[in-house]
Every structure is written in structure tokens, then in C-alpha cells.
Image (cartoon, rainbow, N blue to C red):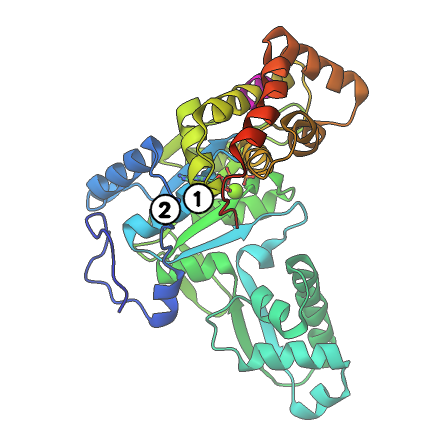
């Protein structure tokens, strides 16, 4: 049995999780700092949990890259005591990625005649206990990436169907990550569903988000577990990107606008992450990131200056690197390498007198020696 720091907001305190499920419940690391958004959602969901149609179980976190959307979704898993899983959407997703796949079981003799890698993948699938998704099973059986595994699955489906025509066979259903979370009552992070191109796929996803919905599969009907929570995380749309489907937005009962956190929070997070404590230096670096972020937006420069750049820049400076030089490698070139755009960013920093400040940092750090780091 795991120890829980805080069970106050557990949604189903009596629910017994399996050991494997228990492992999926996020454990907050010491570096985690609860945000206002986290407290608000946690209270709201808990308050409405037994209020029938007012129940909140589809949540949208939309905003800046690195603003903490994924970590917030994980923190909710910890607060609610629900296993956390995620699905990363991609443009070519098809319905089997949303729902799952039905795979005929082919005879051992036939299995022998197929390609070694197909054999390995199929055997792993047939032997699976359904705890992992097909993609995960194939990923670990063949040691390949998620995309490759998704493709492999499609290839296997085709192969198996070709090989079994006419034969009376047994069929097995392999649920997707989404269906598993839906059926077993997990907290599912759905990352970037706005990239999905196929309207039919979006419709399948929409119907999976119905409050008391069910999913019709060729083999059975699957009902939404009362504990299932979907957290959609997506970057705010910009010119050229796809807007999150309206029907999907409409099914959300709570949404948060996730921006680059306030300067105080930025500095606090960087401190716990890097172990670097110098307030004055952190303040200059945070100001720089904020100016670059605003300037990039105002000038339609596509890259982002966000929390991740801030952490790595801070860490480089803490390690004794020149703040000015690492500004380029950790922040600016991550935004853009276009000379015209870089010029715009540099001018903005000059205008706010930040370049001089950044230049003065190096000496400070050299004088005080290198602070310790704990960046993973
Ligand atoms: N509440 C928090 N306390 C401490 N650190 C945090 C917190 N939230 C986020 N971070 C840190 O900020 C970084 C970015 O967070 P996260 O990955 O959650 O952002 P995101 O919004 O999901 O980004 P993306 O849009 O790229 O998916 C991570 O290193 C994470 O550990
Ligand atoms: Mg994320």
C-alpha cells in the first residue's frame, strides 16, 4: 500500500486500485509547486463530483508551451488519486487509434511463416494481459518508437486479415489507451487533439467525451467509468495552426488559460529545479525571458521563450557559463535563427537595458563560485 500525502480530494476514496494502477497515480516530486489553477480545478471537480449533470470530468488546459499543462494534469491525478495516462495526438490518427483494434488470432502454424518481427509483435499481443495498449506492447516487444509501433499495428492488421480470409478464427479486441482509461476510470491527458485531420476521428473522440457515454465496439459496448477524467492540453492556436475543434471545446466543463507563469513563480520553479538561489540574477534572467516572449509574439516570430529555456539558461549560468553567451544557446536560437528576427529580439533587450544587466551577471557568479545543481 502506498502512502498518500493528501487524500482530502480523492474522488473515490473507497476504490481499490490494483498495484499496477497504483503505480500510475502520479507522486508529486518535491520540486512540484501547486498553482492557483491546480487548486481551483481540484476544488471545483471535488465539489461537483456527485452533482449529476453538473459533474466536471472534461477539462481543457490551453496556452503557452512549457506553462505547466502536463504537470498540472499529473498533479490532478495525484490529488484525485486516479491513475494517470496520456495519449499524444498526431495528424494522421485514425479511428483505431481512438478506439482500438480488432485482431483475428492466427494459428501457430501460420504465425511461423510470417516475418520474424511480425511474429514477435503478434506473439507479444496475443500474450498480453490487456493492461498495456497495443502501441505500448509493440513498442517494447520491438524496441521502436510510438509512431513506428502505431504503423506496425496497422500493418499487422492488414497482414492478419489477408492471412486469415475464409478461415474461422477467434477475434480479440485490443483497446486503445483512450478506451482503457475510459473503461477503467483513469485520468487521461489528451495532448494536442487539434492536430487531428480526419473529421470522423474527431467525432469518435467527441462521443468518447460524452458525460454518460458509451463506446460501441464490434465486440461489445463499453461504458464510461464514473471516475474517468479527460484533460485536454493544447497550445493556443496561432496563425497557421489548427484551432481546437468546436464540438470538442463544447464538451469541456472547465477550462484554464495557461500562460507563462508570473515572474515570482518562474523564479521559484527555477530555484527548486536548479538549486540556484541568487534572486538578483534570477530576476534578470526572468525579465529577459518575459521580454523575449512578448517581443516574439508582437512580431509574429513563431518560436517560444518559455519556462524550459529559462530553466536551462539558469542552470548554465549557475554552472558558471557566461550569461550573455548562453542566452543565445539556451534561449534565442531556440526561438529563431533568422538574423532579422534575432535583431528584433536584441533590440527589445537593449531597449529594456537587459543586455547590460545580463553582461554584468557573469562576473557576479564567478566571484561567488558555482552553486550546486539538481537538474535531472
Ligand atoms: N507546478 C509546477 N511546479 C514546478 N515545476 C513545474 C510546475 N509545472 C510545470 N513545471 C515545470 O515546467 C516545465 C514545463 O512543464 P510542462 O511539461 O507541464 O509544460 P506544458 O505546458 O505541458 O508544455 P508543452 O506545451 O510543451 O507540452 C517542466 O520542466 C515542469 O517540471
Ligand atoms: Mg505538455
The answer to whether 331 is drawn above or below residue 273 in the figure is: above
Q: Quadrant of residue 321?
A: top right
Let me know if residue 54 appears in the view. Answer: no
359 vs 144, nearest the viewer = 359
169 vs 44, nearest the viewer = 44
Q: Position of residue 347 (x, y in %)?
A: 69, 10
The answer to whether 85 is drawn above or below residue 17 in the figure is: above
Queried on whether the Cβ of the residue with tag 1 lies below 8 angstroms from ligand 1, the answer reads yes
Residue 139: say if magenta. no
Dominant SS of magenta comes to: helix
Residue located at (52% from left, 78% from top): 128
Instruction: Say which mark, if any, is on residue 71.
Output: 1
81 vs 232, nearest the viewer = 81
Q: Secondary structure at mark 1?
A: helix
Q: Secondary structure at mark 2?
A: helix
Residue located at (49% from left, 26% from top): 282
Amino acid at each position: 500500500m502506498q502512502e498518500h500525502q493528501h487524500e482530502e480530494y480523492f474522488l473515490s476514496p473507497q476504490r481499490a486500485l490494483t498495484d499496477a494502477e497504483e503505480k500510475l497515480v502520479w507522486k508529486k516530486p518535491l520540486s512540484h509547486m501547486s498553482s492557483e489553477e491546480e487548486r481551483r480545478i481540484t476544488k471545483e471537480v471535488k465539489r461537483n463530483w456527485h452533482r449529476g449533470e453538473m459533474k466536471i470530468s472534461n477539462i481543457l488546459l490551453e496556452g503557452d508551451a512549457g506553462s505547466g499543462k502536463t504537470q498540472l494534469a499529473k498533479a490532478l491525478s495525484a490529488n484525485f488519486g486516479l491513475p494517470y495516462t496520456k495519449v499524444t495526438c498526431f495528424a494522421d490518427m485514425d479511428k483505431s487509434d481512438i478506439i482500438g483494434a480488432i485482431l483475428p488470432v492466427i494459428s501457430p502454424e501460420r504465425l511461423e511463416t510470417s516475418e520474424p518481427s511480425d511474429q514477435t509483435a503478434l506473439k507479444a499481443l496475443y500474450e498480453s494481459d490487456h493492461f498495456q495498449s497495443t502501441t505500448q506492447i509493440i513498442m517494447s516487444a520491438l524496441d521502436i518508437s510510438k509512431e513506428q509501433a502505431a504503423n506496425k499495428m496497422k500493418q499487422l492488421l492488414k497482414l492478419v486479415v489477408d492471412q486469415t480470409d475464409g478461415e474461422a478464427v477467434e477475434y480479440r479486441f485490443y483497446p486503445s489507451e483512450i478506451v482503457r482509461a475510459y473503461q477503467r476510470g483513469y485520468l487521461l491527458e489528451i495532448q494536442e487533439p487539434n492536430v487531428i485531420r480526419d473529421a470522423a476521428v474527431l467525432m469518435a473522440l467527441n462521443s468518447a467525451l460524452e458525460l454518460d457515454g458509451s463506446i460501441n465496439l464490434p465486440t461489445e459496448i463499453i461504458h464510461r467509468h464514473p471516475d474517468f477524467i479527460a484533460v485536454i492540453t493544447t497550445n493556443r492556436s496561432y496563425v497557421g495552426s489548427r484551432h481546437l475543434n468546436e464540438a470538442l471545446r463544447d464538451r469541456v466543463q472547465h477550462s484554464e488559460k495557461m500562460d507563462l507563469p508570473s515572474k515570482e513563480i518562474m523564479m521559484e520553479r527555477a530555484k527548486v529545479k536548479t538549486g540556484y538561489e541568487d534572486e538578483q540574477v534570477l530576476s534578470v534572467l526572468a525579465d529577459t525571458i518575459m521580454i523575449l516572449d512578448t517581443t516574439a509574439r508582437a512580431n509574429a516570430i513563431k518560436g517560444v521563450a518559455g519556462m524550459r529555456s529559462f530553466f536551462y539558461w539558469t542552470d548554465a549560468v549557475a554552472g558558471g557559463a557566461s550569461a550573455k553567451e548562453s542566452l543565445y544557446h539556451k534561449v534565442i536560437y531556440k526561438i529563431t535563427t533568422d538574423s532579422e528576427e534575432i535583431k528584433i529580439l536584441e533590440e527589445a533587450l537593449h531597449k529594456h537595458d537587459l543586455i547590460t544587466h545580463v553582461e554584468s551577471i557573469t562576473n557576479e557568479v564567478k566571484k561567488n563560485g558555482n552553486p550546486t545543481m539538481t537538474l535531472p
